[in-house]
Amino acid sequence: MKLVRFRHDSEIRPGILTEEGMIRDTSRVGCDYSESFFERSASVESLENFSTDWASDSLHVLESTELVEPLTRPSKIVCVGLNYARHAAESGSPVPEEPILFLKSSSAVSGPFDPIQLPQGSSKVDWEVELAVVISKAAKNVAEEDAYDHIFGYTIHNDVSERAWQLERGGQWAKGKGADTFAPLGPYLVTKDEIPDPHSLDLWLKVNGETMQSSNTADMIFSVPFLISYISQFMTLLPGDVVTTGTPEGVGMGCKPEPRYLKAGDEVTLGITGLGEQRQEVVDA
């Protein structure tokens, strides 16, 4: 099942994307895609029943509907750095022996087609296509073999990064990761039953139509269940939290002979097998 959230008459409503490419409005179920929704075990079943029972008057044409981020603001976004070997190499870093973790501000979340805003004073804004995992139930000290029980589904994340702030301003990476619009999510949230193996998905990103990233999640150093288990040793993952699993090679920072960064007027498009595509125009804040 593909869950979406969309704007209708100036309000945000939850919905289901049908196989016919339509959106079925599920707001009558009475729950947005929030922490309380994800922690209710019967949520997906309720949506399936709703999709079957309600008449076609709850349908909206996808092409004329503004999609926003497919879940409400999570309590946290946990990111994994350098989780693809070739990306570590282009960054001039050794392959990590343990996952590198950092937090991204929840205020950075934006929709899949919202503009990327260049923050005032920024100079090295970069792109990163990533597979993101959405947590279904609280995870604390979870065994790796039990990790899938704590996954609701998957979506796309563009881990937009200001490299000068991340690497040249001292302290943690969070400085370059948390600006407004730096965490586009969507276009939809796909339940895990539709993605039986998250480690065999093609992912790509283009800037102004030029392919910059093209890889497969099979190249991840640390697997999805390992990451869930590992992160849960250090913090409790709550329902609706987002774990984003790293980016492959091809970021602007690694371009040769010189790095390449985003500027106002650029267009970024990105996608992952089975999870749809995003598109963002780059604008000055």
Image: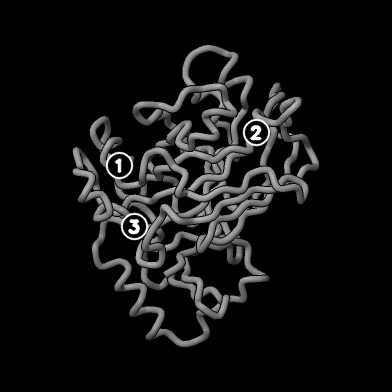
Q: CA distance from mark 3 to mark 1?
A: 16 Å
**Label 3: element kind:** strand
**Label 1: element kind:** helix
The quarter of the image holding the C terminus is: top right
Q: Which mark is residue 171?
A: none
State if disc 1 and disc 3 touch (CB < 8 Å).
no
> Disc 1 residue type?
Phe
> Disc 2 residue type?
Asp
Q: Residue at x 50, y 71 (%)?
A: 17
Q: Earlier in the sequence, mark 3 or mark 2?
A: 2
Q: Which residue is mark 1?
A: 226
Q: Which residue is mark 2?
A: 126
- 234 up-or-down from 77: above or below: above
Q: Is residue 272 left or right of residue 103?
A: right
> Disc 3 residue type?
Phe
Q: Residue at x 59, y 55 (%)?
A: 271
Q: Is residue 193 left or right of residue 104?
A: left
When asked about the image quadrant of residue 63, the answer is bottom right
Q: Position of residue 50 (x, y in %)?
A: 37, 78
Q: Position of residue 141 (x, y in %)?
A: 19, 38
